[in-house]
Image (cartoon, rainbow, N blue to C red):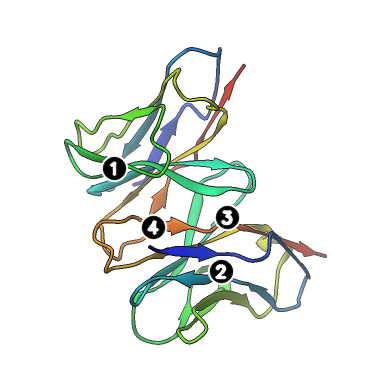
Amino acid sequence: DGGITQSPKYLFRKEGQNVTLSCEQNLNHDAMYWYRQDPGQGLRLIYYSQIVNDFQKGDIAEGYSVSREKKESFPLTVTSAQKNPTAFYLCASSIGWNTGELFFGEGSRLTVL
Amino acid sequence: AQSVAQPEDQVNVAEGNPLTVKCTYSVSGNPYLFWYVQYPNRGLQFLLKYITGDNLVKGSYGFEAEFNKSQTSFHLKKPSALVSDSALYFCAVRDPNSGNTPLVFGKGTRLSVIA
């Protein structure tokens, strides 16, 4: 079945450690996105990529980094510079940029102790 | 700039009654509008979208939404609510005239359907 796979689903880390969240899609979608979800704040865009080897900052990119070396993969690294990294992270993809809806993964919940 | 507002944090409705989840938007031109649903600890699922054409859009699980340009609204509706509809609902908008700007999401409305 085609879809988006995020791993791990739950992750615990100590403060000051970098962590990388995996996002893989087999939908052959060009565009991929990372959102952060916090209670009462909806979804906020971290980074997005329209095509391989290209990505842009979203609204809250500080303290995060991404890469897009392959069409199907868009990993997110939460660095120690991120002030409040505990959150639910959602990866998504879309077949096109213009009118296509987003397909979401099941999310990764990061807790920094 | 594009933005979307969901004025209600929480909506409560009795099972079998009609439900409405409100959404208003602000874009410079004609919007692309979307509704998504999220169940606890899960990703978002697409419900329906309006791009052009008929103002009444039908989507998954019996949901529909009406695009109202004069009121800049895109409310989500269902004629008869089910307990299983209880979830978090997100409205999203994209301004096709804004270049490569991605979807902007509202803050979500929690729907609780009471048996």
Disc 2 from disc 3: Cα separation = 22 Å
Characterize the local packing of mark 1: few (<14), some (14-19) or many (20 or more) Cα atoms within 10 angstroms.
few
| Whole-number angstrom distance, CA of label 4 to CA of label 1 | 22 Å
Determine the CA span between mark 1 and mark 2: 25 Å
Distance of label 1 from label 3 (alpha carbons): 29 Å
Number of dots carrying numbers: 4
Viewport quadrant of the C terminus of chain B:
bottom right
- In which chain is the residue bearing label 3? B
Identify which residue is drawn at 64% across, 43% down: A39
> What amino acid is found at the position of numbered circle 3 in the picture?
Lys
- Label disc, if present, on residue B103 of the rendered structure: 4
Chain at numbered mark 4: B
How far apart are the two marked residues, 2 and 4, measured between alpha carbons? 23 Å
- Comparing marks 1 and 3, which lies closer to the viewer? 3
For label 2, the crowd category at 10 Å Cα-Cα, with few meaning under 14, some 14 to 19 and many 20 or more, is: few
Numbered disc 4: secondary structure: loop
Residue, disc 2 = B61
Mark 1 sits on what residue?
A26
Q: Position of residue A93 (x, y in %)?
A: 33, 48
Amino acid type for the residue under numbered disc 1 = Asn
Same chain check for tags 3 and 4 = yes
